[in-house]
Image (tube, rainbow, N blue to C red):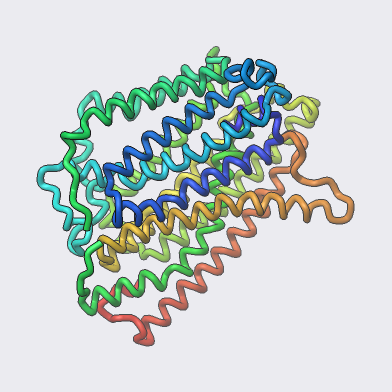
């Protein structure tokens, strides 16, 4: 999508990244509202139906927004050029992206609970039972053993095949149209089992909580200001989804005689993140025995600082290579610098993201929050990171305006080669460092509150 907006719409890389970061942020905030809607009114199956249809319509409208599809109807040209993007194409595109956000959000809220409902031993009370982990389905050690060859093919090989094949399709209409057709088929197959699926009865049931439960739930609510420090971490993560990819787009990706598409590198980056999460989840009890929740969060922020510093240094090197080879005004030329230079910052970003997720999971487990509260806290934490994605757009604008003070050149130009993204990374490194100091202060305040007896001693002191 970043390439589509910069190559076809000919938007600046910062404008395209801003659009995608706002979209990503909304997709991370919506699940908090959808979770309440599922619990109170419609249930997981209905949400999955709505999200599947919404996603299919969304990607379909995006495919229709490409210039050749409606050229005869709108009277515009058929080339993939900005002058061929008329009002109708823009309306279809923005509507499609909105529906995609709804589809992805509903999927994230209801897929795992719906799969749990298909278990014959599943009980709806498990979601509100304090002695059961609401994320037990995800953390079940035997889950991988239940996956057969077909499951592995679906979750691993199909995305890899798609990442390799789709970039070689030169028609953007087909590049978006093929996923639209695939989504329509998948939705149709899903709906064929409507009468066979087990649908758990909804429970928004009022229960009396014990004193300890009230204390731990109250403490979890009190930690909301602490989670607000994650907004900056969301800003850093947003750079990985946009600017890191923009850097890699014109770098040397050759592996021998093969030039793998950027989509494959992005997919492998996601798999590496899952690998870090898998290793971290293998020994949770051992880690929790000597690493507290504040320590996990602080470590994640330290990795965030290291990620920004590494990214700044690598981008400085990339700019030097561009300058030496006279490529400042040739944004479409390949840069003679291996894409492997970006791997460390991707790795550090993955560790930071996994650390935040571990902290959220550990928080809800250690304070023994009721299941009905626990899942909202998890969604809230992700929503805070989503706010960070949208704040990333504001930070780019603010930094660009400040960089112009005194008649100087704005750090963000139309093309990446003419921009000074390395300086922006240094700003993020400083901002994340200040946030780390703020977090340590907030965490210390909570520790002092506990020591003064303002929190139920039965709850965990972390």
In this rendering, the answer to whether 209 lies above or below 100 is below
- Residue 236 lies, in percent from the top left, at 56, 50
In the rendered image, residue 152, in percent from the top left (x then y), is placed at: 28, 27
Instruction: Give whichever of 457, 185 is nearer the camera.
Output: 185
Seen in the picture, residue 320 relative to 395 is either above or below; the reply is: above
Residue sitting at x 23%, y 41%: 115
Residue 228 place in picture, x, y as percent: 50, 64
Can residue 48 be seen at all in this image of the molecule? yes
The residue shown at (59%, 39%) is: 242
Residue ranking furthest to the right: 407
Which residue is at the far front? 73
Is residue 35 toward the left or the right of residue 14 in the image?
left
Quick one: 221 or 183, which is closer to the camera? 183
Tell me where residue 324 sits by quadrant.
top right
Q: Residue at the top extreme?
A: 257
Specify the quadrant that holds the N terminus.
top right
Q: Quadrant of the C terminus?
A: bottom left
From the top left corner, tell me how far across and down residue 246 is, in percent.
Answer: 62, 34
Quarter-of-image position of residue 13: top right
Q: Residue furthest left?
A: 121
Count numbered badges in the picture.
Answer: 0
Residue at 60%, 20% (x, y): give it.
Answer: 70
- Residue 306 visible in the snapshot: no
53 relative position to 411: left or right? left
Q: Nearer the viewer, residue 339 or 191?
A: 191
Residue 452 in the image: above or below residue 125: below
């Amino acid at each position: 999508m970043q390439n589509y907006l910069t190559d076809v719409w000919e938007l600046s890389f910062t404008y395209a990244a801003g659009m995608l970061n706002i979209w990503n942020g909304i997709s991370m905030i919506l699940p908090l509202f959808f979770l309440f809607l599922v619990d109170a009114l419609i249930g997981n199956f209905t949400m999955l139906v709505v999200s599947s249809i919404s996603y299919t319509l969304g990607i379909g409208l995006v495919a229709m927004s490409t210039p050749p599809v409606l050229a005869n109807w709108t009277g515009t040209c058929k080339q993939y050029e900005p002058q061929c993007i008329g009002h109708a194409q823009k309306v279809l595109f923005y509507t499609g992206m909105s529906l995609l956000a709804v589809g992805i959000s509903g999927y994230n809220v209801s897929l795992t609970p719906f799969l749990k409902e298909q278990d014959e031993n599943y009980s709806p009370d498990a979601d509100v039972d304090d002695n059961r982990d609401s994320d037990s389905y995800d953390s079940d050690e035997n889950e991988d053993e239940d996956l057969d060859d077909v499951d592995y093919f679906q979750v691993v090989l199909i995305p890899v095949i798609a990442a390799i094949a789709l970039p070689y399709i030169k028609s953007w209409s087909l590049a978006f149209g093929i996923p639209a057709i695939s989504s329509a088929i998948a939705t149709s197959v899903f709906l064929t089992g409507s009468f066979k699926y087990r649908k758990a009865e909804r429970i928004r049931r009022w229960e009396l909580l014990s004193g300890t439960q009230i204390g731990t739930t109250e403490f979890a609510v009190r930690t909301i200001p602490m989670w607000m420090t994650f907004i900056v971490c969301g800003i850093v993560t947003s750079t990985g989804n946009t600017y890191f990819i923009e850097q890699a787009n014109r770098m040397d990706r050759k592996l021998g005689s093969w030039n793998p598409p950027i989509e494959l590198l992005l997919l492998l980056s996601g798999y590496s993140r899952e690998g870090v999460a898998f290793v971290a989840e293998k020994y949770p009890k051992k880690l929790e025995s000597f690493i507290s929740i504040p320590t996990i969060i602080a470590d994640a922020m330290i990795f965030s600082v290291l990620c920004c510093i590494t990214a700044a240094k690598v981008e400085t090197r990339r700019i030097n290579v561009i300058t030496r080879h006279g490529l400042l005004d040739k944004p479409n030329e390949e840069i003679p610098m291996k894409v492997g230079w970006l791997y460390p910052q991707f790795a550090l970003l993955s560790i930071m993201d996994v650390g935040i997720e571990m902290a959220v999971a550990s928080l809800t487990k250690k304070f023994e929050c009721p299941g009905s509260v626990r899942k909202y806290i998890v969604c809230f934490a992700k929503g805070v990171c989503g706010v960070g994605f949208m704040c990333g757009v504001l930070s780019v604008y603010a930094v660009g305006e400040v960089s112009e003070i005194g008649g100087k050149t704005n750090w963000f130009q139309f093309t990446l080669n003419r921009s000074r993204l390395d300086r922006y990374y240094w700003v993020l490194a400083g901002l994340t460092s200040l946030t780390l100091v703020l977090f340590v202060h907030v965490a210390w305040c909570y520790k002092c509150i506990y020591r003064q007896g303002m929190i139920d001693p039965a709850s965990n002191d972390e």
